[in-house]
Image (cartoon, rainbow, N blue to C red):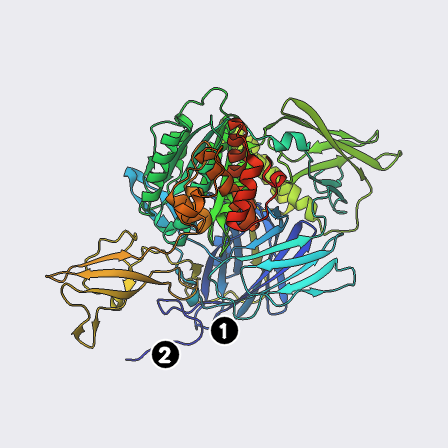
Amino acid sequence: MMVNCCGLLTASKEPVPLKSIEVEVEVRDHVATVVSTLNYENKEDKPIEAVFVFPLPGDAAVCHFSAKIGQKEIVAEVKEKQKAREEYDDALSSGQQAFLLEESEQSPDIFSLSVGSLPPRESASIRLEYVTELAVQADDGLRFCLPAVLNPRYQHLHQGALKPQLRSEVAIVKVTSVPASLVPYSLSFSARLSSPRPVSKVESSCSLDPLQYLNTEQTQATVKLAAGHKFDRDVELLIYYKDAHQPTAVVEAGQASAKPGTLMGDPVVMLSLYPEFPQAVMSSVASCGEFVLLLDRSGSMQGERMKSAKDTLLLLLKSLPMGCYFNIYSFGSSHEHIFPKSVEYSQETMEEALKKVGEMTANLGGTEILRPLKDIYSQPCIPNQPRQLFVFTDGEVGNTKEVINLVKKNSGSHRCFSFGIGEGASSALINGLAKEGGGHAQFITGKERMQPKVMQSLRFALQPAVVDVSVNWDVPKGVSVTALSPPITALFQGQRSLIYAQLTGQSSEAAEGCVMVKYSLAGHPSQNQLHFNLTPAEDTGLTVHRLAARTLIRSLEMEEKECTGEQGEGVKKKVVEVSVQSGVSSVFTAFIAVNKGDGEAIQGPLVRRNVPTPMMMACSMPMPSMWCAKMSMDCDMGPTPMYRSARQGGSRAFFSGMKKRAVMVKPQMIGCGMPQQLSYDMEMNEGCSVKISPKQPPRDPLLQLISLQKASGSWELDSALAAALGKTSKEVEKPKPASVNQEVWATILALIWLHGSKMDAKDEWELLAMKAVSWLRAQNAPSVTECLEAGNTLLGFTVKKDALGL
């Protein structure tokens, strides 16, 4: 019997009730309001319940949820979670339509939406609204990310067993995940931008229609996602304003219907601070510290991600200062370390570490980050060597809150810098690690290079730590200030800090306030102050209030984890109170909407339909059998590659003793483009076993040169250096001034080459060049000017002495 399947279908041929998602974003300066409309249609002949589990940015504040059925709109209310669930169940059992939206208890960036009792042939439109802050990137761009991809999240289970599972315990539902190219619903996306400063450009890893300006000052613009976007990546916008680093203050009026004295009834101020540190302090680089690098080696890191991470570790290790300590941990289902405890940085330890890094592959299974973190924190800190932790992960863990709590508990003894690699990295995890660890978070997506972002974070880590941070308010008599943000623990040059505060009471005096941020940097007390107008700005739709409520809710949720008994219940009660009052979601509340219409109850048994979620296909998933061929391999590629069968038309493709070239198709993330064709050398011996070894692509000349630098900062004059400079040994040795030793000459040549041919990548090699210059100064070398002239002539550049810092 043949079954006709119509409309939207899942991989298992079940009808999908979700038809399309429309997203509209309004960006005001560095805050975004996002409205998502999810359109459902039940084409079946029985009532259904549709369940959709999806990601949101980790720091988003969900503040509105409503459903439209026909012409009727039902707006959801925020209620205590258990109460909301019971109300939802009661509505379904009495045949009423109901809608439930819940935040995951394990991670604040995963939500589950249940659409209950959607009648046959009925449509429903769900509107979901949230507000979020935009993070500043290394190049001053503001990053907006709409997570379109939900990766499997790995959860640690008993007896050391691990299995991938989606963080959807809130809905107690198994989520079906399908490759992005098979997602049976569409996405449309548009953004409207406005700022006091002109919008200079918008970039994205997705295809965009051209930026449209709405006024001659170019302070307002719109941008849309080009048609035909596949769910194979997060939708990321990088927004660039002119003079983006100005400190600002926005005062927003309270809700007219709310009681004065409450969070929603009073004005709230949002301060955006950019401290400027003295150049003299910033140009000095710390020569101490314990640098612990933690690298994700789970299966999903294989391929380009792993290669990029290893290249980055090379750069990091070459850029560390002499006199510091370091260690490298890597993790998957289990974890490993290069040294039993952190060792002093020297030529020997650096070489040993680089050798081990070169052997690393993405072969450690799942993503279990909690255990290696506990291991790192169990090591005693080294006196006078501040600990700096660098975490590299594609951010697919199931116990995000537990991990972040552990980092927070140890925040007094270290700073944590985090890097989210690839699409679908959990923003809650990456941002949470950095925020609670007093460090800085970076995201590396698409074809972005990891190295510049990591080197920026290393510069932050080498900056003197800002200590004794205090925020003092000066407001007129009759007005009081209640801080809603946790105390600031980390300040970095060129990085923004947002502070929220509630303003209670009124004043007859001047309507101006002032905030002063004091701190100590390298033993020097400093202060930044900002004056602001207490008169609220035009209506901004309570965006600032909701972000302030979200900040307060997150702080209280962290506090509740540390409390027990009555104290914990008291904090939980406060979270529910703030959440209900502000209409902002929390882990203890949920949005519930019930259609209490006059119509008849919906008849018939309810059928459950889980809406498939787009995911990046895990590389370790079983391959279709058509790709299989009986070949034994000893190439180190992680999971067995897919490849074209060696049998073509029944004849054997290879003959004993002959060496052939075959085209291999590497498993790729579904939807990330065409399979990557790689060239392999294959040898077949008697008995048909095949030895396959990938042909190594030529190494990046910059990395080639950097790999030859010694821990001290110098280079040796040898054939490898000559090759990296594109010369022969003879050509490099001949012009050396007689009075100069070989190491000094080699180091000056390397610096000339970096300044002459790689200025576009200066942020990647600047620190190791500074180390080389320090080494040269310590040598008190004669004839530096003569060396520079001879080196420029040899390499064909005109690099000046002061450009090198000599």
Please provide percent x and percent y for residue 49. 45, 61
Residue 526, image quadrant: top right
What's the residue at 56%, 35% (across, down)?
A: 784
Please provide percent x and percent y for residue 386. 50, 26
Please provide percent x and percent y for residue 74. 61, 60
Where's the N terminus, which quadrant? bottom left
Q: Amino acid at mark 1?
A: Arg
Helix, strand, or loop for circle 1? loop
Please provide percent x and percent y for residue 417. 51, 38
Q: Is residue 474 above or below residue 313?
A: above
Extreme-front residue of the structure: 738
Residue 121: mark in rendering: 1
What's the residue at 29%, 54% (across, down)?
A: 639
312 left or right, relative to 767: left
Decide: few, some or many residues near mark 1? Use Cα within 10 Å; few <14, some 14-19, many ≥20.
few
Residue 4: mark in rendering: 2
Residue 675: mark in rendering: none
447 or 507: which is nearer to us? 447
How far, Cα to Cα, is label 2 from label 1? 18 Å
